[in-house]
Image: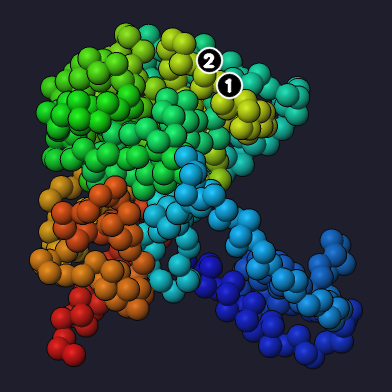
């Protein structure tokens, strides 16, 4: 956050000085700017890149940065009003809607301003990402023979085998497809398993990105409540009977947003209920590599305990590395695998080979287990810091479950508190939080928010964020 703020400040100062230079005139060298403004070379480079993106300067490798020539007069905008008719014609008979609501996903993807504490993030802060290891893996992958050749459409065999070993059970490399991370894999799975208009059973609360996928595919998400032990089997069975659904999507490990883990006895029940209903279970195993240091042994994926091909397994490297390292896997057994494969080929052909080779280099390096251990220790520390700060400064916020994996806490607001008002007040106080409403496919039972402790710089920023939340709550409590 400090680096981002420095870049923003330097870019603003350079904008104000551009009028001193004629179009085409050279700006001071990077070394001069470093000494003058007392910032790092990286900050100077990023600030100049920002101005170049705005069309204010032109950078020439080896020559420096120059004030850009004045822009030509922008031609008058055309009349795009006709698109309203074209985009909405026959909307009443659409099985697959052309209008997609991405607001629930953007709540955790959109980066807030530099001064705002990012409690809404869904990925590791750059300080937790294995940037050096990823860079080294990418460099090694680039030297591999044939790295720019077309890969097998299913993915390179060695990477498929690595994912298969991580899943366990009877899953083999031949049962795995390499995908562009988990979101793509979930999209493929839902398209393969349910036709437009069909019901799909989902956990409540559950991952907004999956709800968005389902609705964009014309499916009807049907909620099945989750408690401290995961999804309730009796209600799952009732939902299958009432709807005739053939798909259930779940996150058995460190569920998003509650952080719960499906209890051992419920794991067997979920598989039995789905098998009796002739239905598939899509297992989104997104957080396995985000276990905290005190987690202890983790339960195996549901796919490892499924001999009958009930489970379609989704996993990814993205959450444990970087939002831009988009490599994941789909695993399934039986005829469904060919349908999954066909949809992926039509949609994307294949995941670029250099990315797959880099993933293989990364997970095969000594840096990989070191990175996972470091992340596990830091996530535990951050979780404990946020939990203690909330209990000390904001005891009126209920924290029903403290997870031992994942990157966030699920918090219930006081009775009568308006969730949207709380979220807006928090942002005014300098904290971005994820509202709870997008995590429900039907009416939520209470006002809740998700607070991420992974997307911030560290424990100090967590405590500052909670302090600002206290300010927001006090402001909302004052009589108007």
Q: Taking the image as drawn, is residue 358 in sight?
A: no
Dividing the picture into quadrants, the one containing residue 478 is bottom left
| Residue 97 as seen in the image, left or right of residue 44 | left
Residue 32 in the image: x percent, y percent? 74, 77
Label 1 Cα crowd, 10 Å radius (few <14 / some 14-19 / many 20+): some
Q: Is mark 1 on a helix, strand or loop?
A: helix
Label 2 Cα crowd, 10 Å radius (few <14 / some 14-19 / many 20+): some
* Residue 269 position (above or below residue 50): above
Q: Which mark is residue 338?
A: 2
* Residue 473 position (above or below residue 198): below
User: Residue drawn 47% across and 49% down?
Assistant: 92
* Residue 308 position (above or below residue 261): above
User: Residue drawn 43% across and 58% down?
Assistant: 103
Residue 190 in the image: x percent, y percent? 43, 31
Q: Nearer the viewer, residue 366 or 440?
A: 440
Q: Which of 112 and 64 is in front in this view?
A: 112
Q: Is mark 2 on a helix, strand or loop?
A: helix
Q: Which mark is residue 342?
A: 1
Q: Which of 318 and 220 is in front in this view?
A: 220
Query: Marks 1 and 2: CB-CB under 8 Å?
Result: yes
| Residue 421 as seen in the image, left or right of residue 99 | left
Locate the C terminus and report the quarter of the image it occupies.
bottom left
Q: How far apart are marks 1 and 2 (CA)?
A: 6 Å
Residue 444 in the image: x percent, y percent? 21, 54
Q: Which of 75 and 96 is in front in this view?
A: 96
Task: Report the coloring of the rendering.
Answer: rainbow
């Amino acid at each position: 956050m400090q680096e981002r703020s420095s870049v923003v400040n330097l870019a603003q100062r350079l904008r104000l000085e551009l009028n001193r230079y004629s179009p085409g005139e050279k700006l001071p060298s990077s070394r001069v700017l470093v000494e003058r403004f007392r910032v790092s070379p990286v900050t100077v480079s990023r600030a100049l890149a920002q101005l170049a993106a705005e069309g204010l300067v032109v950078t020439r490798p080896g020559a420096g940065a120059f004030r850009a020539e004045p822009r030509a007069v922008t031609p008058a905008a055309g009349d795009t009003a006709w698109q309203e008719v074209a985009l909405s014609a026959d909307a009443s008979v659409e099985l697959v809607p052309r209008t997609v609501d991405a607001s629930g996903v953007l709540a955790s993807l959109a980066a807030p301003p530099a001064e705002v504490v990012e409690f809404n993030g869904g990925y590791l802060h750059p300080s937790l990402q294995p940037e050096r290891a990823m860079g080294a893996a990418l460099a090694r992958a680039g030297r591999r023979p044939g790295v720019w050749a077309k890969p097998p459409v299913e993915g390179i065999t060695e990477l498929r085998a690595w994912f298969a070993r991580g899943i366990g059970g009877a899953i083999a490399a031949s049962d795995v497809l390499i995908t562009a991370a988990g979101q793509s894999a979930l999209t493929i799975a839902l398209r393969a398993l349910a036709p437009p208009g069909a019901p799909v059973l989902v956990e409540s609360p559950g991952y907004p990105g999956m709800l968005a996928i389902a609705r964009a595919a014309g499916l009807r998400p049907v909620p099945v409540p989750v408690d401290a032990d995961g999804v309730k089997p009796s209600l799952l069975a009732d939902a299958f009977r009432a709807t005739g659904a053939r798909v259930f999507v779940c996150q058995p490990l460190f569920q998003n947003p509650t952080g719960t883990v499906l209890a051992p006895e419920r794991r067997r029940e979920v598989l039995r209920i789905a098998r009796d209903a002739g239905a598939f279970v899509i297992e989104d195993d997104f957080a396995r590599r985000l276990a905290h240091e005190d987690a202890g042994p983790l339960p195996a994926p549901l796919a490892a305990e499924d001999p009958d091909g009930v489970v379609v397994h989704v996993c990814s490297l993205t959450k444990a590395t970087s939002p831009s390292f988009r490599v994941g896997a789909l695993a399934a057994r039986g005829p469904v695998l060919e349908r999954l494969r066909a949809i992926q080929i039509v949609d994307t052909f294949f995941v670029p080979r250099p990315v797959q080779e880099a993933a293989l280099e990364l997970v095969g390096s000594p840096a990989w287990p070191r990175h996972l251990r470091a992340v596990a220790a830091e996530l535990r520390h951050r979780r404990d810091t946020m939990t203690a700060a909330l209990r000390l400064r904001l005891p009126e916020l209920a924290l029903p479950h403290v997870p031992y994996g994942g990157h966030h806490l699920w918090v219930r607001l006081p009775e009568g508190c308006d969730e949207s008002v709380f979220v807006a007040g928090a942002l005014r106080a300098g904290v971005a939080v994820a509202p709870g409403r997008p995590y429900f496919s039907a009416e939520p039972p209470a006002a809740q928010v998700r607070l991420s402790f992974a997307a911030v710089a560290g424990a100090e920023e967590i405590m500052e964020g909670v302090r600002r939340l206290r300010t927001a709550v006090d402001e909302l409590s004052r009589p108007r």
